[in-house]
Amino acid sequence: MNDKPVIVALDFPAAEPALELAARLSPELCRLKVGKELFTRAGPQLVESLQDRGFEIFLDLKFHDIPNTVAGAVRSAAELGVWMVNVHAGGGRRMMEAAKEALQSFSTPPLLIAVTILTSMSDEDLRELGYTESAGDRVMRLAALTRDSGLDGVVCSAMEAPALRRQMGADFCLVTPGIRLQGDDAGDQRRVLTPAAALASGSDYLVIGRSITGADEPLAALERVHRELAASE
Ligand SMILES: O=C(O)c1cc(=O)[nH]c(=O)n1[C@@H]1O[C@H](COP(=O)(O)O)[C@@H](O)[C@H]1O
């Protein structure tokens, strides 16, 4: 297990609750993810405030556009000094290669990760989009394309992690959302696992939102995750 596998998803509508939650966590125990809702409202200033408090940031804006536009967006993220940034693998090889190329001039570039198939998507959802492959097969295809395009890894469901680890090797970074503490509601997620099961499946980083941010005591929930991970080693 790497030293800090937990990334807490700050899915809040404004800076204030995000900063309040961050104040109840510790940069020793987790990194933070700033996604579309929060970034659209609070922007780079919020990212900088969180960094000033010692947190490394996963900027989760899932860029998906023409190569030139995505390259510029990824460059802007790197200039913000974030630790991880992501794009949609569905943007294709040229888009991902352009994103990678945009990071060449940075001495410590962010990890560049691609989203394969969202963990909210079921096989049935994919069929409705006209895809004949199962979610699992499509994830494998998109992950191979991601690796061949020079990216560092993928966001995927922990359910796909064992096959991805086998196929992509030890150095390919697997970031897995869709994590729930035992007893928590899955909500809109479709392919969920517990933290220990996700790590045992080969995940490097666990993205955890509501199981921590929705807990009465977020730090206690984060510590519970760490205890469960340590016990499962
Ligand atoms: O890129 C992501 O982080 C992501 C990809 C994906 O396939 N599924 C997914 O849930 N996520 C994110 O992971 C977080 C999960 O939050 P919870 O379901 O509350 O734990 C959210 O911020 C999602 O945006």
Image (cartoon, rainbow, N blue to C red):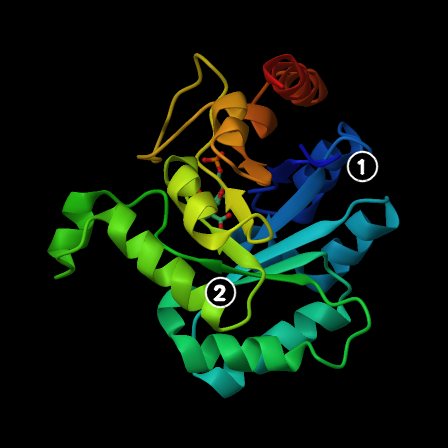
68, 147: nearer the viewer: 147
Q: Residue at x 63, y 39 (%)?
A: 7
Quadrant in which the N terminus is drawn? top right
Pinpoint residue 158: horizontal percent, then vertical percent.
43, 36
Q: Is residue 180 left or right of residue 102?
A: left
Q: Amino acid at mark 2?
A: Arg
Q: Is mark 1 within 8 Å of ligand 1?
A: no
**111 relative to 205, above or below:** below
Q: Name the residue at 42% across, 38% down.
A: 162
Q: Report x, y in % for residue 169.
A: 52, 51
Q: CA distance from mark 2 to mark 1?
A: 30 Å
Question: Which one is nearer the viewer's eye here, 171 or 104?
Answer: 171
Q: Quadrant of the C terminus?
A: top right
Observer able to see residue 63: no
Say which residue label 2 marks. Answer: 147
Relative image position of residue 10 (x, y in whole percent): 61, 41
First in sequence, mark 2 or 1: give its number: 1
**Which is more foreground, mark 2 or mark 1?**
2
The residue that label 1 is drawn on is 27
Asked whether residue 62 appears in the rendered view, the answer is yes
In the shown orientation, is residue 169 left or right of residue 219? left
For mark 2, give the secondary structure.
helix
- Residue 72 percent location from the top left of the image: 60, 82
Instruction: Indicate which disc residue 105 carries.
Output: none
Residue 25 position (above or below residue 72): above
- Report which quarter residue 183 is drawn in: top left
Q: Quadrant of residue 75?
A: bottom right
